[in-house]
Image: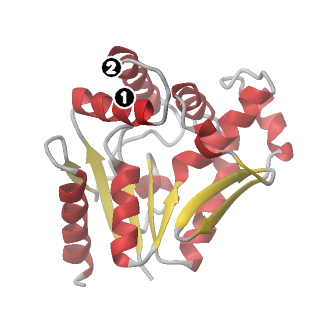
């Protein structure tokens, strides 16, 4: 059993790299951001302010979030429904950031994440994996890149999914979310003291994947 934690800001390529590493190492990939996006989606569907902690907490008993795997691909279901790319919009990014600052939401999702890690070898990505979710992970990596590089990647990803946006809009949203995530009172998005910081600004996805695998082998001796 092995636990690999990858933290870092939006657009650093965490999910792309983590998926590729999971495939090469034959372990399970857990996209924790999708869990918060799912809660945010439900909050949005109820027209509740995602920063109203009491109102959001009151909705949690109505929410059932499940992680399923089909052919090695993670699927997040909300009350039995696979939301697909509906949780991948810029609006849902901001909702995810807002609800993730609420202690009740973090507690609600904490056991879901830890249970998967207890029962499987995992690579988990997010913003507080190495600091809160898996503080004893075998390998901790903080993946980052320049603001401009991250915004370009994120814009290209959204456009490829048919979501109309511009580089300027993505950059502004990203910088706001970065600030909100870094400065939240609960589980701020910062590198764990024992994490290895990896800047992949000038790396291809393949090079980033190889760099992470090298770090895993160095840390674990495998």
C-alpha gap between disc 2 and disc 1: 6 Å
Residue at image location 35% in from the left, 38% down from the top: 11
Is 149 drawn above or below residue 219 in the view shown?
above
Q: Nearer the viewer, residue 118 or 24?
A: 24
Question: What colouring style does the render use?
Answer: secondary structure
Q: Give the side of residue 92 with respect to residue 45, left or right.
A: left
Query: Picture quarter containing residue 19?
Result: bottom left
Q: Which quadrant would the C terminus be assigned to in this image?
A: bottom left
Query: Picture quarter containing residue 67?
Result: bottom right
Please tell me whether mark 2 sits on a helix, a strand or a loop.
helix
Label 1: few (<14), some or many (≥20) within 10 Å? many
* View extreme (left): residue: 202
Label 2: few (<14), some or many (≥20) within 10 Å? some
Please tell me whether mark 1 sits on a helix, a strand or a loop.
helix
Q: Using the rendered image of the protein, determine whether residue 182 is visible from the camera's viewpoint.
A: no
Residue at image location 28% in from the left, 57% down from the top: 195
Return the x and y of residue 134 as percentages of the image width and height. 48, 63
Return the x and y of residue 172 as percentages of the image width and height. 38, 17
Q: Nearer the viewer, residue 222 or 55?
A: 222
Q: Are marks 2 and 1 in contact (CB under 8 Å)?
A: yes
Return the x and y of residue 84 as percentages of the image width and height. 62, 46
Identify the residue position indicated by label 2 in the image.
Answer: 167
- Which disc is residue 196 wearing? none
Identify the residue position indicated by label 1 in the image.
Answer: 155
Return the x and y of residue 144 as percentages of the image width and height. 26, 43
Q: Using the rendered image of the protein, determine whether residue 107 is visible from the camera's viewpoint.
A: yes
If you read the primary sequence from the N terminus, does the residue marked by circle 2 or circle 1 appear first?
1
Task: Please state the total of marks drawn on the protein image.
Answer: 2
Q: Nearer the viewer, residue 102 or 202?
A: 202
Q: Which quadrant would the N terminus be assigned to in this image?
A: bottom left
Residue at image location 66% in from the left, 42% down from the top: 38
Residue at image location 23% in from the left, 39% down from the top: 145
């Amino acid at each position: 059993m092995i636990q690999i934690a990858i933290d870092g800001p939006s657009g650093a390529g965490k999910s792309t790299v983590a998926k590729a590493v999971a495939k090469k190492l034959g372990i399970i990939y857990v996209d924790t951001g999708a869990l918060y996006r799912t809660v945010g989606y439900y909050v949005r569907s109820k027209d509740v302010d995602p920063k109203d902690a009491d109102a959001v907490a009151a909705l949690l008993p109505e929410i059932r979030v499940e992680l399923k795997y089909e052919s090695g691909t993670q699927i997040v279901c909300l009350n039995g429904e696979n939301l697909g790319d509906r949780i991948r919009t810029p609006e849902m990014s901001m909702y995810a950031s807002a609800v993730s600052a609420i202690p009740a939401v973090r507690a609600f999702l904490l056991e879901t994440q830890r249970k998967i890690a207890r029962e499987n070898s995992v690579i988990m990505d997010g913003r507080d994996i190495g600091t809160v979710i898996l503080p004893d992970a075998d390998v901790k990596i903080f993946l980052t890149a320049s603001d401009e590089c991250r915004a370009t990647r994120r814009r290209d990803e959204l456009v490829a999914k048919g979501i109309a946006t511009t580089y300027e809009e993505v950059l502004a949203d990203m910088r706001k979310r970065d600030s909100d995530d870094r400065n939240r009172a609960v589980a701020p998005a910062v590198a764990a003291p024992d994490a290895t910081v990896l800047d992949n600004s000038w790396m291809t996805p393949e090079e980033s994947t190889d760099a992470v695998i090298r770090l895993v082998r160095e840390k674990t001796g495998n």
